[in-house]
Amino acid sequence: MAYKVQFVNPAKCYRKMKPELDAAYLDCMENGELIDRRHLKRFEENLAAFVGTRFAVGLNSGYDALHMSLRAAGIGPGSEVIVPSHTFVATCSAVVNAGATPVLVDVGADFNIDAGKVEEAITEKTKAIIPVHLNGYMADMERITDIAERYALAVIEDACQSLGSSIKGRKAGAWGLSGCWSFYPFKILGGYGDGGAITTDDPAAAIFARRMRYNGEDRTTGEYHGHGFTSLLDNLQAAFLDVKLKRFPDNIKRRKEIAGMYREGLSGIPGLALPHYDRPGFDHVYQNYVVRSAHGNEFSEFLKKSGVEVLTQFRKPYYLHSGLKLSDRSFPETEALSREVCSLPMNPELEDEDVDYVIKTVRSFHFACQE
Ligand SMILES: *Cc1c(COP(=O)(O)O)cnc(C)c1O
């Protein structure tokens, strides 16, 4: 079924930037620049400058960014790593595949790890915390940094959904040992295939990632410094991402405008919670606009039937998937929000009339419910 309002609209996004994206493509193709060339270097410099770190290293994916960061921090078998119980599964899988044990902690009303519950999860084996900045809104990094300092833990930020967000002006990805980025097409800065990066101030972590993404090789000397991976961000993807990074601040402005329209149109509806937290100093960039509806699937199905494409990530918490073999503890907040989450369309390609249609549809659902 063709939706009246799409969740994302990559073709429309392309049309808006076609001349610059086509020029980037031709520049790579005509010069035969494919692997580890100018465009990658330039994008890494611009990404590091945007985030406010000394280094950025382009990788294959957000998953690889997490995995590489854990390796850089020396985390492996015998280590425990604290992760939130509500996140994309890759946060946890990176820990498992590094050989370490994930220790899950419940989230708060803002969908991010509950900093008040972190300390009780720390043991002698704990080596790191991975706070996830979900949906474009940062976890409480002041409290998490404080805990990490007191227990000498590494902090690896899963910032895959929050490029551009900040707390008191300090950007996501500039707090921990590293910030991990995904450029999967539908992320806030998306490429045209898989892609990722880390940002870091730590020269050793940057050098480690630069070598490990290239099978452990130091590309100037040819020396292998360890068993690595094939995990380089494609030069072509980097060229596209660099074009999109220039437009990125305008896109965030538009996302905030749309969030403002949703807030105005949807505030005060009983049984509908909106993602506005108003914590001083926290800047939300709205990678996703996730509402909570007491009506769960009835609400999300109604929207879909009415032509509004929505996502319900995640109805089933990842730790309840038996194949992941994670011990099934209970995380009450995660379970409550999982029944209720619904991401409304949120992308810079939305027109005001699209947003109005979503608002009208949501209101009509709740109006019908009250009869
Ligand atoms: C997308 C995402 C990842 C993984 O990124 P990939 O590029 O798909 O590997 C990890 N964590 C979070 C929170 C994400 O949203």
Image (tube, rainbow, N blue to C red):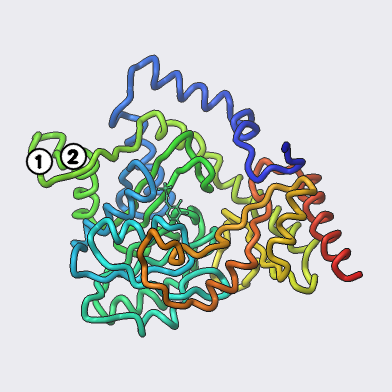
Residue at the spot 75% in from the left edge and 73% down from the top edge? 271
- The amino acid type, in three-letter code, at marker 2 is Asn
Q: Nearer the viewer, residue 11 or 89?
A: 89
Residue at the spot 40% in from the left edge and 59% down from the top edge? 158
User: Where in the figure is residue 180, as x and y percent of width and height?
Assistant: 37, 54
Q: Is residue 51 above or below residue 111?
A: above
Q: Is residue 23 visible?
A: yes
Residue at the spot 42% in from the left edge and 53% down from the top edge? 51
Residue at the spot 48% in from the left edge and 66% down from the top edge? 86
User: Where in the figure is residue 45, as x and y percent of width and height?
Assistant: 35, 42
- Please identify the quarter of the rendering in which residue 272 is found: bottom right
Single out the residue that lies furthest toward the top: 30
- The amino acid type, in three-letter code, at marker 1 is Tyr
Single out the residue that lies furthest toward the front: 322
If you read the primary sequence from the N terminus, does the residue marked by circle 2 or circle 1 appear first? 2
Question: How many neighbours does mark 1 have within 10 angstroms: few (below 14), some (14-19), or many (20 or more)?
Answer: some
User: What is the number of the mark on residue 224?
Assistant: 1
Q: Nearer the viewer, residue 104 or 226?
A: 104
Q: Relative to residue 259, is residue 178 drawn left or right?
A: left
User: What is the number of the mark on residue 215?
Assistant: 2
CB-based contact (under 8 Å), mark 2 and mark 1: yes
